Every structure is written in C-alpha cells, then in structure tokens.
Image (cartoon, grey):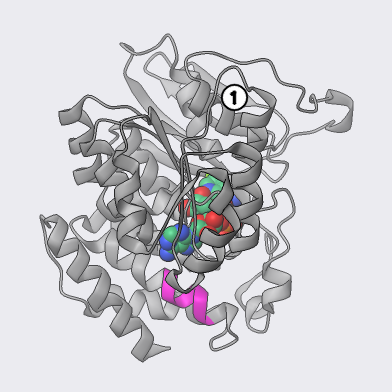
Amino acid sequence: MGSTGSIGTQALKVIEANPDHFKVEVLTAYSNADLLIEQAMAFRPNVVVIGDESKFTYVNDALFTYDIKVYAGQEALGQVVEMEEIDVVLTALVGYAGLTPTMNAIYAGKNIALANKETLVVAGELVTAAAKLKGVNIYPVDSEHSAIFQCLVGEWHNPIEKIYLTASGGPFRGKCKEDLVGVTKAQALKHPNWEMGAKITIDSASMMNKGLEVIEAKWLFGLRNEQIDVIVHPQSIIHSIVQFEDGSMKAQMGLPDMKLPIQYAIGYPKRLPANFPRFNFMDYPSLTFEAPDKQTFRNLQLAFDALEQGGNAPCILNAANEVAVQAFLEDKIGFLEMSDVIADCLAKVAFVKKPTLVEYEETDQSTREKAMELV
Ligand code: NAD
Ligand code: MG
C-alpha cells in the first residue's frame, strides 16, 4: 500500500532483486497514476488501486490489455488487503489513512510489514490487540524499530529493561528557537541522512517523527512509557539500542538505507543476501551522542505528554500534526507554529480514556476541524 512513495518504491527494488522470494499481488497509490501504471506493467500484480477516483479511467485504460484489475477510491483501498492470495501487507501509505486498511488486513489474518507508524500512534492498543487475537505478526519497517526487533531475536524470554531510539536530530539540530522562527519549507525538507516523503521529512525536522516513534515502540514491544528513551546520534549508523535486565546493551548498526529494514520485514525470519553498500569504519572515525533538546523541539515533548496522557491523546496529537505539517508545506503557518496548533488541540479536543474505533474516527475528525480553525 503506497507503492509510489519513498518506502513503496524501495520495497519494489527489494522485490525486484529477489524474484524467487516475493510476488506482488496488489499495488496501491493515491494519485501518481503514471508511476502506478509503470509499476503494474513491470510487476504484473493481480490488482491495482488508485485512491483518487478521478484517475480511474486513465489507469484502467492503460492496463486494459494486461489482465490487471483496476479499482479506485478509499473503500477499495481498505478492501483489497483482504484478498486470499496475500500473505503480507506492507503498509507504506502516509498518515491516518493507514488505519482502516491495516485493521482490515489484520482481521483477514494477514501479517503486516508496518511502515505507516501513524496507525500505531493513533490506535496502537486496538491494532496490537487485534493482531494478538488473530495471531498475526506486525513486522516493523521503521529503521529504529527494525533495529530493536533485530536485537530481540533470540531474546524473546529476556525482559527488556529499556530501549533507546536513536534520532539524527534532523536539519536543525543544535539550533535554538530564535533560529527556527523563519525557517522555510525548503530548509526543512533537506534531511541530512535520509531521503523520504515530505510529511516524514518535516516530522524529522520538528522531531515529531521521533515522538511518533516513541509511541510506535510502546505498542510494538509492549513497553511502559518510562522504558523508552531518545538519544540524538547525528551519523544515523546505530539504528537503536536495547538494554536488558543485566545491563547489557545490544545495538543494530549499518549505513542508513531503508531497503534493509524493508527486506528484513518482508523476508523475516530469513536474512536474504543483498548488495547494499557496506559500512566502512574509516569513513566514520567517531560516532557521537547527545541529549535531545525538547524545549526547542517542542513536538517531541508534546508527544511524550500525549503518551503519558494516553487514551485518545496520541490520536489528537497525530491529527493536529498532519494538519499542521500540511499547512506548513502550504506556507500557511511557520515552523514553530506547528507546535502551537498541536498543543492547542491537545488542550481543547475532548479527552476519551478508552476509545473505540468509532471514537478514534470522531477524535481524528474533530481534531482536524479544530486544527484547521487554528491554522
Ligand atoms: P511518501 O509520501 O513518499 O509515499 C506515500 C505513499 O502513500 C504514496 O504511494 C501515496 O500515493 C500513498 N498515499 C498517500 N496518502 C494516501 C491516502 N490518503 N490514501 C492512500 N494512499 C495514500 O511517504 P513515505 O516516506 O514512503 O512514508 C510512508 C510511511 O512510512 C509513513 O507513515 C512514514 O512515516 C513511514 N516511514 C517512512 C520512512 C522513509 O524513509 N520514507 C522511514 C520510516 C517510516
Ligand atoms: Mg524511523
């Protein structure tokens, strides 16, 4: 899901390099019809879905002679994940839109390779409970969570004392609030170590990405809030660290390349051979670490606050952030104002302690309305 995006296109590279291991059944995209058509011609799935219904005829005409079924619209996006031939669904779409397809896939008994962290941020408790009920696995694609998962192999019965999620610090590491007042979207979209979609790149610049990842980690690994810490590591070589009850720490490291965690998630438990560039110690004479600055990067603090509050607070945080990031990308608000919108929504949208799926939907909607007003 989301085959035309940063994760989606890299996943197709992994699949292309391992034709004996993987077959593509379904490809979905929101609006990039040309790339979706090109991918469909190359990978010959049974079905493609284009989210934007106005592009249905265009895609359908292009694939008419290929014996590929074409569907369009949000409902179809949610339904195709249930198809019988599917073993694993890679959720690489952005934002809240990932929740319904992920839940449907779990209820249909499919394993999930999860890139779409927002799904766990919004409704981690429901999603992980459904996965447990249906006996399906959620394999992390996010590099930090993949690192933790890789460190836990062979340690399933050893309790985790603590995890450290590493953060690059983004393009504005070391800056103070005054420096950030007038930063432009072009500056925010320049990530030092990773090339990613626009939303997650802005989230990385504001450190909301790490905040979302803290919440994602809680649900993926069943942790208490105080067991999760963030450490800034500008080189992005150590992808995260687990500390066990004897004090021993395990870290996973390598060059930053999302193809590795993608391949590990869809190939698990195998480590498939790959020709990704290898790490050379001489290129990195020092790996460094520093504390995150939660005052300048207020989004990170807001995410910890939402986690602590629990209930629908992370859902409010996520929806407000999606609206704020979009508004920043459209030059409607400044960089620091994104945090104001999120903090205001957290203070004003009705708190629900143990939300149902319907209540999450309502929270998402009412937060978007509130955030839009504030913008
Ligand atoms: P992207 O913007 O590059 O791609 C998003 C894909 O999802 C596109 O194919 C798009 O067509 C589709 N899409 C977008 N909105 C949609 C909607 N409303 N309905 C259906 N489809 C929709 O994003 P990305 O960088 O590939 O990120 C995807 C997810 O993976 C995000 O949740 C992100 O946080 C997570 N992630 C990305 C990276 C990375 O390196 N890019 C790393 C870790 C986690
Ligand atoms: Mg990450």
Residue type (three-letter) at the residue carrying disc 1: Gln
In this figure, which residue is indicated by the disc labeled 1? 252
Residue 70: horizontal and vertical position, in percent?
A: 45, 54
Q: Is residue 140 above or below residue 345?
A: above
Q: In the depicted view, which residue is nearer to us: 153 or 7?
A: 7
Residue at point 34% right, 35% down?
Answer: 220
Q: Residues within 10 Å of mark 1 (few under 14, many from 20)?
A: some
Q: Is residue 179 left or right of residue 98?
A: right
Residue at point 30% right, 11% down?
Answer: 157
Residue 226: tell me if it is visible: no
Q: Is residue 196 above or below residue 224?
A: below
Instruction: Tell me the chief SS of the magenta region.
Output: helix
Residue at point 27% right, 27% down?
Answer: 136
**Number of numbered discs overlaid on the protein picture:** 1
Query: Which stretch did the figure color magenta?
Result: 322-327
Q: In the depicted view, which residue is nearer to us: 73 or 238?
A: 73
Residue 283: horizontal and vertical position, in percent?
A: 88, 32
Q: Is residue 34 above or below residue 275?
A: below
Q: Quadrant of the C terminus?
A: bottom left
Q: Is residue 236 left or right of residue 354?
A: right
